Amino acid sequence: MLTVRDLTKIYANRFDTQAGGVREVSFDLPEGTFFTLLGPSGCGKTTTLRCVAGLERPDAGTIAVGDRVLFDSTSKTAVPLNERGIGMVFQSYAIWPHMTVFENIAFPLRVAKGVKPGKEEVRSLVEQALSTVGLAGYGDRPATRLSGGQQQRVALARAIVHRPKLLLLDEPLSNLDAALREEMRIELRRLQQQIGVTTIYVTHDQSEALAMSDRIAVMEKGRIVQMGNPREIYFRPASVFVASFIGAANLLTGICDGAVVPGAIGSVRLPDGARIGCLFPAGGADGQATTVSVRPESIVFADQAVLSGIVTAASFLGGSARYDVQVGDSVLRVVGGAEEVVAPGTSVGLSFAASSAVVVG
Amino acid sequence: MNRALAWARQDMRRVIAALVGLVLAVLMLPPLWILLQDSITTTDAIGDVTGFTLAHFGKLFTDKDAIRSIWNSLVFAAGSTALSLIVGGVLAWLVERTNAPFKILAYLATIISLGTPYILHVIAWLFLLGKIGPLNDAYRTLTGGTANLFNVNSMAGMILIEGFLWSPLVFLLLGSTFRAANADMEEAARMSGATVLQTLRRVSLPLAMPAILALALFVFIRAIGGFEVPALVGMPGRIYVLTTDVYEATIVVPPDLGYAAAFSVVMVVIVAVLLYFYSRLSKNAEKYHSVTGKGFRPRPFDLGAGRWIAGAIIIANFCIVLVLPMLTLLWMSLLPFLRGFSVAGLSMLTLKNFRTVFTAPGYVELATNSLMVAAAAATFIMAITALAGWIAARRGPGGWLLDQLATLSLVFPGICLGVAVMEVYLRVPLPIYGSLWIIAIAYVIRFMPYGMRYVYSGVLQLHHELEEAAGVAGAGSLTTLRRIVAPLLSPAIIAGWLFIFLVANKELAIAVLLASPGSQVIAVSIFDQWVNGQGGELAAFGLIWTVLMTVIACLFFAQGRRGGTDVFGN
């Protein structure tokens, strides 16, 4: 449905930092996909979104929705943003304060090119959009008298009222408080599935990305470094960056012990001599320096241990308990059951399945 | 599809920018050009250039009087800046950051002084401090002699009057600085054991210093270009400054326009250099701005028993800035001829002057002329700057150039702009010279920067996503401008309009060389009446005018509060 090829947009180098922008970003989205661009601030995710929207002009690349080319640097095609027929929710919501809720939502219909919908049609479309976002009956309110969550719903209604093929969401939840954010996360996903619109969602919050997306693209320094479904991203991180950006990761470094074919389980020798079994998604050569990522919740305390260490800190979190365990020179984080009590100073054995220890570099 | 049409729609902002840029260039560039040209050329009787010369500048730098004028200008500007900063600054701090009583009086004085033509204040002060005024009168009575305590037509008199003229502006601008300052920093100092005075000296003042310096430079620039005080106070005492020299060179017969232009160029250069430092300073001041944006009300300092002293200071200022000048004007307006305050005078009180104002034919026409010229200029400026300011603030095509063009006239002191505009439109083969149009054009050029400031800061307050959302929703540039930007910007546009309308009706310097007998405006007419000795009528008319302008000033302040913009668009 949406095709983005080699999208590049470089910002002039300001101050001493690296030049911002995006480089050779490509992705293909099937109809109805909830696609998330995830990354730290400055990674280029918002720039990518703004290029698709037409708010920025890319330096190179192509953008197409279905058969319709929106941007192509080689044929010098650039459809103006107001003719792209895209719906977008902005980070600040951008609700126009001088209009009522109804007028805000009706705006895309009123400025539509070509056949403008009649008065009755506008009314029914707006009311439909309002009830979709759960704000039926709010039409006559001045836009200034809305809570944060309500403003966000109005922004969403405005973005979907003209039935766009593509919906763009720019960190829409970042201005809400924690409880509301949780609620809107579920709500947004439900809504997207209900209307079935292809959606690009930009966020720096990994839990939002994991909870809502069909597909996630993790970006770093202007490039997509890994793309996949939430489980792949979480359990099979392709790099140290992805492993440590998505959730907490314990990183162990060692030497590959014997050649391993891609996708097979191999063995890594740690500096203190211990050997651990782990998954080599890309294979490995004998003697190669290797970094392994293990999620804290994959590690359990066990008598028949792979590693042994001493608990240096323990904190009770209610639903679970978190431990710092000194193993050799490094400290591993372990999440254990809340009932079990292990006091600091205790010597423990640690164990994990070879399939949950992933070689990331 | 029609490619040309598509281009036009896509690049509507470019079309708008080009048109606005053209209008601005036609208005703003010729005055500067003509001043430069006149200052280095000789001309014949009808104004055609006959040759190149450096004689005007030569005369300027060898003539003892000219050098003294430059020196006088600097002393005058520095003195009045210092005085207004001390008076306005103390007042601003007392009102904004302490629990001093009678704060409302400070605001009241400021609002009314914003509506009063400067020249009325100056005339009232000339009377109060003059030979027949109450000060010298009381001194003569006390000493029994004929010597006066104070000669108002002196540099000291000029500085005193100009300083108090600017103190309300300083009060307003420093007030907003003090209001925005982060009270936590002062409270932290107090918690560390500092007294109020120590806190003020070690924390509050250093924090406000960049803003204070920027403001000082701003007032200095305005005082260098000040005309009312030098003309009415200085000239009778034979104390000349740059602005009065320019004026003299223009009104002598035959006018020495080359000399006036050379003088103007010197002033423009001085002001341009100062403006450069001003813009650097005010950028610096913004860095120190410790606004938290939490909409908090800082806890005022408790002055203890000292608050009554503070209250006395506020009342004294209120009397000096407002009550005394207004009482003086009232006294002047109620007497058939000018005389000092006395009990004997009370028996002669009459409403004759007020009757004349309402029945004589000239006054109504004069008022309508003034209001119409000011309204026309304000309307035109806001229409142009609404577009130019929007494009500039959004970094649209040519935005930087539009901004530079629109704010170019900041380098002109009023009197120099008067000379330049006169020169330009003497040569334009249109019946503009000698009509009200030329005054309107001069106002437009002069006050364009203010309109720009209001719109520019107004646009910056609008989140850019508000416009982008309209674009994504399907609206083109023009629709976005009409349906989103214009309505949201209207408070800033209205505030800018009212401000320009007020200052245009106040200023004497721009219009004094451009007005002709058939096309007068208020400030010039008051000036003429004062020179002709018609003090009573002018006082009566001035009072009525002040009431009218105060109403508009109140509207302006109400609008400023609503729009959230800084009072002077700064």
Image (tube, helix red, strand yellow):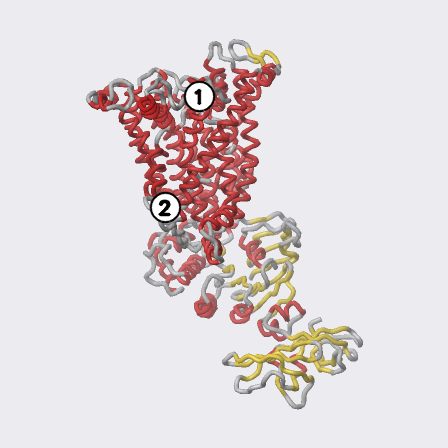
* Relative side of B37 to B539, left or right: right
Residue A204, compared with residue A285, is above or below; it is above
Residue B562's disc number:
2
Q: Chain of mark 2?
A: B
Displayed quadrant of residue A20: bottom right
The residue located at (24%, 20%) in the rendering is B356
The residue located at (63%, 48%) in the rendering is A75
Residue B234's disc number:
1
Residue A61 appears anywhere in the view: no
Nearer to me, B462 or B357:
B357
Nearer to me, A9 or A54:
A9
* Relative side of B111 to B80, left or right: left
Q: Amino acid at mark 1?
A: Gly
Residue B438, compared with residue A329, is above or below; it is above
Q: Report crowding for label 1: few under 14, some 14 to 19, many 20 or more residues within 10 A (C-alpha).
A: many
Secondary structure under the numbered disc 2 in the rendered image: helix
Nearer to me, B380 or B255:
B255
Q: Position of residue B150 (x, y in %)?
A: 39, 24
Q: What is the CA distance from the residue labelled 2 to the residue labelled 1?
A: 41 Å
